[in-house]
Amino acid sequence: MISKCDHPGCTKAGTCRAPKTRDLKDYWWFCKEHAAEYNKNWNYYADMTPDEIEADWEKETFGTSSKNKEQAAKDEADYINFLNDFITGRSTYDRVASKKVLPTKISSAFSVLGLNITASWREVGAKYRALAKKYHPDITHNKTDSTAEFTRVTNAYEVLKKYFKEN
């Protein structure tokens, strides 16, 4: 529903939203001209001290204010733990995944698509689409070879589709 512009005396449609307060939960609805005028004069940091502005900026940028040293230290420790877990966990996963023994049919399907056995379903889908476009018989000139390759790629995709549904 379009309402009338909230600027006193204006009868145009209020199609532009403009914030009433810093929390950005309540808005004025102005016409384009009055919205431009309001935005030119509106200051998000009005009535804030320089220290409050800096704290707000840090909180919005980094997630916590530097004034709260205890919370900042906890957040930093959590982030470092996350990075360590990711790095060590990923390298462990890569070592385990490379030693993982898959049925020949599954590993062959990954090979046909030119993917590692650690590939995700999203990677499988993307690779299949690229190869299907490349080998589709309606697009290529050598219909016999492209039909065989397209069938091979499609069969590999179907095998992996079933594999990912089961796991």
Image (spheres, grey):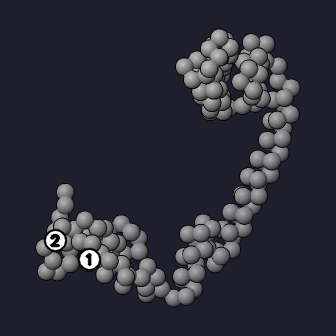
**Residue 22 rendering spot, x and y as whole percentages:** 41, 74
**Which quadrant of the figure has residue 35?**
bottom left
Under mark 1, the amino acid is: Glu
As drawn, 70 above or below 44 = above
As drawn, 11 above or below 96 = below
- The residue closer to the viewer here, 48 or 144, is 144
- The residue closer to the viewer here, 93 or 82, is 93
- The residue closer to the viewer here, 139 or 133, is 139
Between discs 2 and 1, the one toward the N terminus: 2
**Which quadrant of the figure has residue 41?**
bottom left
As drawn, 42 above or below 166 = below
Crowd around label 2: few <14 · some 14–19 · many ≥20 (10 Å): some
Task: Please tell me the numbered disc located at residue 154.
Answer: none
**For mark 1, what is the residue?**
33
Q: Residue at x 62, y 14 (%)?
A: 143
Q: Are marks 2 and 1 in contact (CB under 8 Å)?
A: yes
Secondary structure at badge 2 equals loop
Quarter that holds the C terminus: top right
Task: Please tell me the numbered disc located at residue 12.
Answer: 2
Q: Residue at x 66, y 68 (%)?
A: 71
**Residue 133 rendering spot, x and y as whole percentages:** 59, 27
Q: Residue at x 26, y 77 (%)?
A: 33
Q: Can residue 121 be seen by looking at this rendering? A: no
